[in-house]
Amino acid sequence: MSHVVLLADDDAAIRMVLNQALTRAGYEVRPTGNISTMWNWVSRGEGDVLITDVAMPDGNAFEVMPKIKKLRPDLPMIVMSAQNTFMTAIRANEVGAYEYLPKPFDITEVLSVVARALADAKKPTTGQRNADEVGETMPLVGRSAAMQEIYRALARLMQTDLTVMITGESGTGKELVARALHDFGKRRNGPFVAINMAAIPRDLIEAELFGYEKGAFTGANARSSGRFEQAEGGTLFLDEIGDMPMDAQTRLLRVLQEGEYTMVGGRSAIKTNVRIVAATHRDLGQMIRQGLFREDLYYRLNVVPIRLPPLRERVDDIGDLTLHFLRVAQREGEPVKTITSDAIKLMQNYSWPGNVRELENLVRRLSALYADESISVEIVQNELNIAERPQVNSGGGPVDVSVAVEAHIGQVLGEYEPNLPPAGLYQRVIDRVEAPLIAMALNACGGNQIKAADLLGLNRNTLRKKIRVHSIEIVKHSRRNG
Ligand SMILES: Nc1ncnc2c1ncn2[C@@H]1O[C@H](COP(=O)(O)OP(=O)(O)OP(=O)(O)O)[C@@H](O)[C@H]1O
Ligand SMILES: [Mg+2]
């Protein structure tokens, strides 16, 4: 006998598409456009799995789902919504959804989730946290596919105490995610304590983490609590974990293994109950290979990895984020501003080395510095040019390669402070210069390798080898002067 899928969505086109696909996959489908019909079926004990939209003409699925969960705890509920926000993912999870699928959805994914839900339904279910007050504040903005993945991962993590490792470039929102994990998780009533390894002198990190007893070292005039103690019952956010000195790493590892720590200068072990969330913008894998980070600590921390994509990989979010930051500025007393769609498009073509933080700062400047009510493409162009490495390409004048290289190396060195970048810096820098040199010379010669070798003053075989090494694509075209 085939499984029965209850399908509630007020969009007739979606009902039709899903109905067809599910029927073809061998399910019996009951489609409806309203909640009351869906509830009638459910309360009569019909259906093996439910797929439901959130907002429907006669109500909101999030309101009936707790009732369904109570009446039929084994009925898997799959939520689909076009309101693809962090809060939707969290709410879906809280009302006991089996899975949350953002619209537009992928039919194959729906089918595989349905199959998985039915297979899992036979297993005993774990207790679900009942829905209680959740503020309507939206901590994370952006509805791109990349962020949907993050929201779903976060929603699943909310009821757990698992250790989370957040990685991502600077300004991608790592701290914001760490806070969201706490604020919407089961420890939300406990403290959230952050410690930034990069901001504390290296020899004080252990005292900061574990506290110290009076007289532990010169200047320790009184007992002082550490971050572990302050975070008891809550979340400890270990920010910039890649900057933790080796000896502190060893000590932290022991605490994580044993669940207890001793204060600096202290004798007795103190039990700890904290949820650990760590973050870094560094490549810990590489640091491990260089002997700068303990592999065993890495595995302790990297229980659930979350990678925040750089903003240039989710340009779909730029519009939402800009509007969000404009609204924030407005709340802080700046005048109401709008932004043209061309301006947003221009922003989507920018590379955002500073990610969301850079965007946030840009919007702040735009709302404070310009009198115009509407932010135009020219204004944005103007601001982005100033922000974009001023010495290198200001005003279209000749670009000085050595200045650009200096700026680049300065940035690389700064990123690894106080350590050194991985070995092989010479070749990496030369590669960075060589690849565009060869690509552009080839392009200038219409893709003709003989001419390009001449232009560059390179042997043809050498050029061929370099094209291969840098995977340069050759586009043949004719040039004005042959
Ligand atoms: N998805 C988002 N929605 C709204 N605001 C965001 C989002 N992501 C980041 N921000 C904002 O951008 C700024 C930078 O975020 P955050 O400090 O969390 O980044 P980070 O990854 O910790 O950066 P760093 O590595 O430099 O410490 C913050 O003001 C934060 O509120
Ligand atoms: Mg940070």
Image: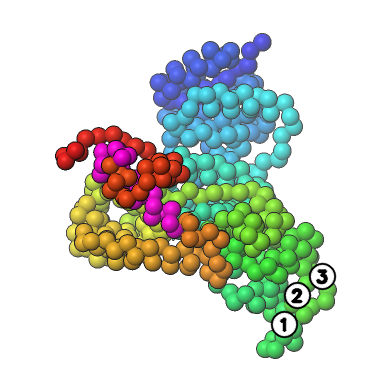
Please identify the quarter of the rendering in which residue 194 is found.
Answer: bottom right
Query: Mark 2 belongs to which amino acid?
Result: Met
Q: Nearer the viewer, residue 418 or 433?
A: 433
Magenta highlight range: 429-450
Residue matched to label 2: 263
Q: Identify the image quadrant of the C terminus.
A: top left
Q: Secondary structure at mark 2?
A: loop
Is 432 colored magenta in this rendering?
Answer: yes
Which label belongs to residue 102? none
Q: Secondary structure at mark 1?
A: loop
Asked if the residue at tag 2 contacts the one at tag 1, i.e. Cβ–Cβ closer than 8 Å, the answer is: yes
Distance from mark 3 CB to nearest ligand 2 atom below 8 Å: no
> Height in image: 231 above or below 481?
below
> Height in image: 465 above or below 246?
above
* Residue 301 point in image, percent of width and height: 67, 55
Residue at x 28% of width, y 34% of height? 476
Residue matched to label 3: 269
Label 2 Cα crowd, 10 Å radius (few <14 / some 14-19 / many 20+): many
* Residue 425 point in image, percent of width and height: 50, 60
Q: Secondary structure at mark 3?
A: loop
If you read the primary sequence from the N terminus, does the residue marked by circle 3 or circle 1 appear first? 1
* Residue 173 point in image, percent of width and height: 48, 56
Q: Nearer the viewer, residue 8 or 174?
A: 174
**103 sits left or right of 376 in the view:** right
In the image as oriented, which residue stretches furthest toward the left? 480
* Tag in front: 1 or 2: 2
Distance from mark 2 CB to nearest ligand 2 atom below 8 Å: no
Query: Mark 1 belongs to which amino acid?
Result: Arg
The overriding secondary structure of the stretch rendered in magenta is: helix
Which label belongs to residue 223? 1
If you read the primary sequence from the N terminus, does the residue marked by circle 2 or circle 3 appear first? 2
